[in-house]
Amino acid sequence: MPVDVTKTSVPASITTPSRVEAAIGALEFTDGYPTSEAAERLRDHLDYLHGVETFMNTTQAVSTYAIRQGFLAAGVNDGDVLLFSELMDSRSLFLTGNADTVYFWSFLDLTQGPQVVETPADSLGCFDDMWFRWISDFGLPGADRGQGGTYLLVGPGYDGPLPEGGCYIRHSRTHHVVVLGRSFINQNPGNDPTPTVSQIKEQLRFSPYAPGGVGSSIGAYLTGKGPLGQAATPHTPRFVEGTGLAMNTIPPADFGHYEMLDALVQLEPAEALDTELAGQFAALGIVKDEKFDPDHRLRKILDEAAAVGNAASRTLGMGAHPSDDFRYYDGDSAWWNMLFAGGFEFTNPPPMITADGVKPFPNKGARQLHSRTSMFYTATGITPAMCMRLTGVGSQYLVSNVGPDGEPFDGAKTYRLSLPKGIPAARFWSLTLYDNQTRSMLQTEQRYPRAGSQQYPSPAAEAESDGSTVVYFAPAQPDDVSPGNWIQTDPERGWFVILRLYSPLQPFFDKSWRPGEIEPVE
């Protein structure tokens, strides 16, 4: 009986032609099998793609590592606290730090066990892990609600006893944890930071967790659920003065990015990694417990990948990507904020707050990568308090990088911004200028490149007779402009500005109040 040898019709769409024309050159195949030249070219191209994606998708991790390295280089060890008692000034290279609140920063090491943190009252802070993933808030938006509280930070792999109560237990996926706090001066006479600094020094405490102490009942001991012991005595951390300290916490924009990433991968457990993301840099040789030692071929590729990855990240960080919709207002307004696109987890916009309660947006199941890269190329720390739509709590930010003509701000020119009456901030508002290159405070003769409602560390901005506030950005103070209404620019440096509203009010969220646009003065 004859065998039917009729072949199935093969659609052209599932086959690979003998020659593929591509941007990387012609790729040749012999009946679907690549030539050695095509395979080599594609290997180089895949390494390049992995290099660019790795650079952009690990900006947050390398930034965290760079901050810790900057601390260590400045003599601020894990467990020490970098405290800006006279606020942060432009000598310190930090991504978009503010000159309005008293910062206190620390890194805690959980490799030897959990750590207890007693937080100061009236602060606004967060615990993040080394991938800038949010662990918990403390202070006003945290569980202690601004009263000061005791937090127990538990690292990965810890399987010992934990207290039944008496503290707020929080788990970290990394052994090292960022402690980032801001405390206020608006309530102090003359906005003097001294009382605020004293409160931080008196109330901020660290101690190793001692199982069986406060929070663990005698009953737990008697039933074999834990030991019986005494709580460790909280100790006052070593405070290092940050004001005026010349230090660099900015991550590298070249091959050093991959070196820092590798150092972080080696520092933390493999379980801290996102497996899909880790696959990108594992393809480049960045693997836990393995040496990262690219050969000449790969090093050359990664040099170019870093250059393009940085350029793309910078474009996102400046809000300049043509397809991203980070604008806060409709129309031609230049004010934007990437967090309103992706929220603090970079998945969905922050939920709406309605009369019926919280109304979340539908989950799209996708990470908003551009929002995340934009955020961590220009800023540090992450918490829901940075973008939640609640009035009177947290802080809100608007960024402007360009004028009405779409051109970046020129440090040699004079610009004007009008803020309408009723600026919606219960605590205070401020404008701070940043250097386009460093994304840190612009360095000029003005030590604090800011203007705002507070009279420290520079004079408060004065309102016009109609209640509006006009601020000028110029190399020299314009005639008849009060010192508090002028922020100095550098003729040789480009700049951008962030408007901060602390304890924002409803007119910001419903957009019944909106800032003017920054316009050139002829």
Image (cartoon, rainbow, N blue to C red):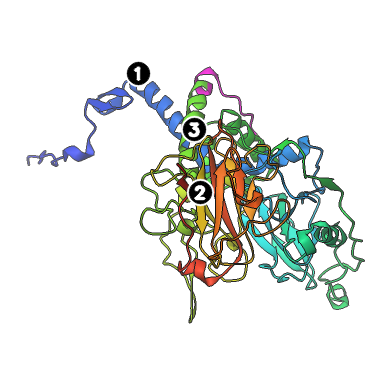
Q: In the rendered view, does 227 fall on the left or right side of 341?
A: right
Can residue 280 be seen here?
Answer: no
Asked if residue 297 lies in the magenta stretch, the reply is yes
Expressed as whole percent of the image width and height from the top left, the position of residue 211 reads 85, 64
Query: Is 79 drawn above or below residue 35 in the view shown?
Result: below
Query: Is 172 drawn above or below residue 150 in the view shown?
Result: above
Q: Residue furthest bottom?
A: 356
Distance between the Cα atoms at labels 1 and 2?
A: 58 Å
Q: How many marks?
A: 3
Question: Quadrant location of residue 155?
Answer: bottom right
Judging by the rendered image, the residue that carries numbered circle 3 is 51
Q: Amino acid at mark 2?
A: Arg
Q: Secondary structure at mark 1?
A: helix
Expressed as whole percent of the image width and height from the top left, the position of residue 172 reads 68, 56
Judging by the rendered image, the residue that carries numbered circle 1 is 37
Q: Which residues are magenta?
A: 290-299
Distance between the Cα atoms at labels 2 and 3?
A: 41 Å
Among the two numbered marks 3 and 1 on one chain, the one whose residue lies closer to the N terminus:
1
Q: Secondary structure at mark 3?
A: helix
Asked if residue 450 lies in the magenta stretch, the reply is no
Q: Main secondary structure of the magenta part?
A: loop
Expressed as whole percent of the image width and height from the top left, the position of residue 130 reads 66, 47
Query: Is 422 drawn above or below residue 324 in the view shown?
Result: below
Judging by the rendered image, the residue that carries numbered circle 2 is 416
Among the two numbered marks 1 and 2 on one chain, the one whose residue lies closer to the N terminus:
1
Distance between the Cα atoms at labels 3 and 1?
A: 21 Å
